[in-house]
Image (cartoon, rainbow, N blue to C red):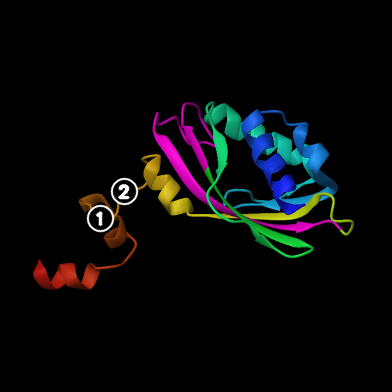
Amino acid sequence: MHDELIDRWEAAWTGRDPDAFAELCAPDLHYEDPLTSPPRYGPAELGEHAQRVWTALPDVRLEPTGARLGDERHVAAPSKLVGTHLAELDGIPPSGSALVLHVVFYCELEPHRERLWRIRAFFDAYGAAVDLGILPRPGTLGERTLMMLRGYGLRGLRRNG
């Protein structure tokens, strides 16, 4: 049961049909990820969120990356979102960069266990920002400068400078 639902979830993200979420998600769906504030409620809002992702990453696809773990009401599904950032996304200008974002979807099924009801996506937002060129890569002068501006390392700079 879990595998079929998650297969359909991945197919909905890859298939670019916002109405596909209505078939596999409960009408009172609650969806959130590190970039959705506030959370999305219902399949229609999730479909709108997905359309923004599809516009920004027109070649996006969601692929499984490991075993799905679950019980009768919950499933954790590791996946990766793969695409090329070619259009603006929530104020982030297109970078032309490839994005490989490892995600774990933690899902709760609705009481009848036929549809997804609560979904939380966990991923490394900092790593995604690095891949898109928004934040500096770890270990670079840019990262050290950013950390200094945030207040880390200022004492060491004063002693040396």
Residue at which label 2 appears = 136
Q: Secondary structure at mark 2?
A: loop
**Is residue 128 at least partly visible in the picture?**
yes
Instruction: Find the distance from the CA under tag 1 to the CA under tag 2.
Output: 9 Å
Taking the spot 73% from the left edge, 53% from the top edge, the residue there is 2
Establish if 15 lies above or below 155: above
**Which residue is the extreme one toward the right?**
112
Q: Amino acid at mark 2?
A: Pro
- As rendered, which of 95 and 71 lies closer to the eye? 71
Q: Quadrant of residue 95?
A: top left
Along the polypeptide, which appears first: circle 1 or circle 2? 2
| Residue 15, above or below 133 | above
Residue bounds of the magenta highlight: 81-110
Please give the residue where the numbered disc 1 appears in the rendered image: 145
Q: Is residue 134 visible?
A: no
98 versus 129 height, above or below: above
Judge the density around disc 2: few (<14), some (14-19), many (≥20) Cα neighbours within 10 Å: some
Q: Amino acid at mark 1?
A: Thr
Which image quadrant is residue 94 in?
Answer: top left
Task: Determine the residue positioned at 47% across, 54% down.
Answer: 124
In the rendered structure, the answer to whether residue 121 lies left or right of residue 27 reads left
Mark 1 vs mark 2, foreground winner is 2
The residue at the point 52 percent across, 27 percent down is 59
Residue 130 coordinates in the image, percent (x, y):
37, 46
Front residue of 24/39: it is 24
Residue 91 is covered by the magenta coloring: yes
Residue 71 placement (x, y as % from top left): 74, 65
